């Protein structure tokens, strides 16, 4: 399946590029938004044809539009939003559109998070949702005290209450992807303001807790997101696990002599123009021939998709060597979605691979082959899907589950451990 490659900064969508917009007069603003809403409705659904500006071709709009967006509810939501334009902020209009698009429960259907209209300034913190809770994994120097802390509350809400409040605005098909996206969607000022979490001083109070210490509070103001943030691994001198050791690379491998494991990390389903995947696969297979490893581990935990066909040379090469290389293990997790999820299923079927790790953020049966609409005035980007893929033939599971569960908790992260790789190396079958 050919699907979109999702950028790591995706929270509830792609990031729009406009940083600032002049505010038109009220009557002009209303007319512009109504034009955008008409363009949105026509492009996403009926009459069912829209223009892909990048390719200059006409497309069919959202497949199964009537099924995913029942006409009566869709029309009522659009009519109500159009009537409310004079009374609500631009940010609220964006959030209402996000909610409408997300109502289909299709992860690839989304409204891009803009860099204007109140969404530019963000909390100078980075969050991650571990299986055992939300934690701070990055911070500007002013808030370094938060690094490595578990989040007990943000404003008046616990993380679980906040997750429930954010869920209608985040396009997702399972709770795994919801948590993965919510960690970023928490940050914009417009979202915090919408949820009533900002105080009169424009700051939000977080209640935090570190292992073995008493809870403490931190008052944080949203700021320019381009400021530097220190990662928790650097601040706390946490040893980097192997899977974090080559940031920015689409694919790489290493032979682990102590365990006779060939470790392959595949982070993006695309060809690096400087080192095509077919050339990479030849190197990996030569390494397999030289060492005849006891196991092969393919790590898809940081892979957000792309073109599912790219992995073909590696898959076929390993298939021809199964009697010589020992079992294949595929590591999956919350960021394994789209074509990466397809690859995990293909490897499981064709190489009898064992899936290890955590449930994937993607769903085996779902919509893909994305297109985009750019609304003419606000420049909001709307992403929608044009094809349905059914990879699970006899069921419709909410997520792709691992055969061997090996969740990575906050304690594991603070210790630099990688339970999934450890489980793959220790597995006997």
Image (cartoon, rainbow, N blue to C red):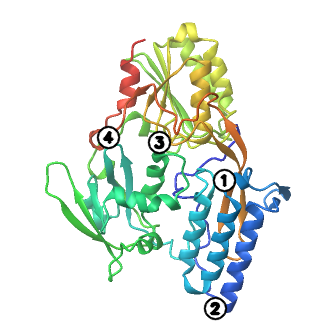
Measured in 3D between alpha carbons, the distance from the residue under mark 1 to the one under mark 2, in whole angstroms, is 33 Å
Q: Nearer the viewer, residue 275 or 225?
A: 225
Rendered image: mark on residue 26: 2
User: Would you place residue 406 above or below residue 81 in this image?
Assistant: above
| Mark with earlier residue (4, 3) | 3
* Residue 187 horizontal side relative to residue 350, left or right: left
Q: x, y percentage for residue 100?
A: 60, 64
Residue 350: which disc? Answer: none
Residue for badge 4: 409
Distance from the alpha carbon under mark 1 to that under mark 3: 24 Å
Q: Residue furthest front?
A: 72
Q: Secondary structure at mark 1?
A: helix
Considering every residue shown, the one lying at the far right of the view is 57
Of the numbered discs 1 and 2, the one sitting upstream in the chain is 2
Q: Nearer the viewer, residue 365 or 80?
A: 80
At x 46%, y 50%, the residue is 180
In which quadrant will I find the N terminus?
A: top right
For numbered disc 3, what is the local secondary structure? Answer: loop
Mark 3 residue crowding within 10 angstroms, few (<14) / some (14–19) / many (20+): many
The residue at which mark 1 appears reads as 68
| Residue 105, x across and y down, in percent | 58, 52
Query: Does label 1 or label 3 sit earlier along the sequence?
Result: 1
Q: Is residue 124 above or below residue 412?
A: below
Quarter of the rendering containing residue 217:
bottom left
- SS for callout 4: loop
């Amino acid at each position: 399946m050919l699907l979109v490659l999702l950028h790591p900064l995706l929270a509830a969508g792609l990031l729009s590029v406009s940083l600032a917009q002049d505010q038109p007069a009220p009557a002009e603003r209303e007319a512009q938004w109504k034009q955008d809403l008409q363009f949105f409705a026509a492009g996403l659904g009926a009459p069912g044809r829209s223009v892909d500006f990048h390719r200059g071709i006409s497309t069919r709009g959202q497949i199964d539009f009537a099924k995913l967006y029942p006409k009566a509810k869709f029309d009522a939501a659009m009519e109500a939003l159009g009537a409310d334009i004079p009374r609500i902020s631009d940010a609220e209009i964006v959030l209402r559109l996000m909610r409408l698009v997300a109502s289909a429960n299709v992860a690839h259907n989304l409204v891009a998070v803009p860099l204007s209209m109140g969404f530019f300034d963000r909390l100078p913190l980075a969050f991650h949702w571990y299986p055992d809770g939300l934690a701070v994994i990055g911070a500007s120097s002013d808030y370094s005290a938060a690094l490595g802390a578990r989040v007990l509350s943000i404003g008046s809400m616990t993380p679980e209450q906040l997750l429930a409040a954010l869920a209608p605005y985040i396009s997702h098909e399972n709770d795994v992807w919801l948590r993965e996206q919510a960690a970023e969607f928490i940050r914009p000022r417009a979202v915090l303001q919408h949820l009533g979490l900002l105080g009169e001083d424009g700051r939000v109070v977080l209640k935090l807790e570190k292992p073995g210490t008493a809870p403490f509070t931190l008052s944080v103001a949203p700021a320019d997101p381009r400021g530097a943030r220190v990662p928790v691994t650097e601040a706390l001198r946490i040893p980097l696990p192997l899977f974090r050791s080559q940031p920015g690379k689409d694919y790489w491998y290493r032979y682990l002599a102590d365990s006779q494991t060939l470790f392959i990390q595949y982070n993006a389903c695309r060809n690096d123009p400087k080192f095509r995947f077919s050339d990479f696969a030849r190197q990996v297979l030569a390494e397999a021939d030289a060492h005849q490893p006891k196991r092969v581990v393919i790590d898809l935990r940081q892979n957000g998709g792309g073109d599912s066909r790219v992995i073909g040379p590696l898959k076929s090469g390993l298939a021809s060597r199964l009697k010589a290389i020992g079992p294949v293990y595929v590591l999956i997790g919350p960021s394994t979605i789209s074509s990466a999820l397809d690859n995990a299923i293909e490897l499981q079927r064709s190489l009898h691979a064992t899936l290890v790790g955590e449930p994937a953020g993607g769903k085996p049966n779902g919509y893909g082959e994305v297109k985009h609409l750019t609304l003419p005035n606000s420049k909001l980007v709307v992403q929608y899907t044009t094809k349905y893929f059914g990879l699970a033939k006899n069921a419709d599971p909410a997520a792709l589950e691992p055969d061997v569960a090996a969740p990575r908790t906050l304690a594991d992260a603070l210790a630099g451990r990688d339970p999934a790789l450890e489980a793959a190396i220790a597995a006997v079958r």
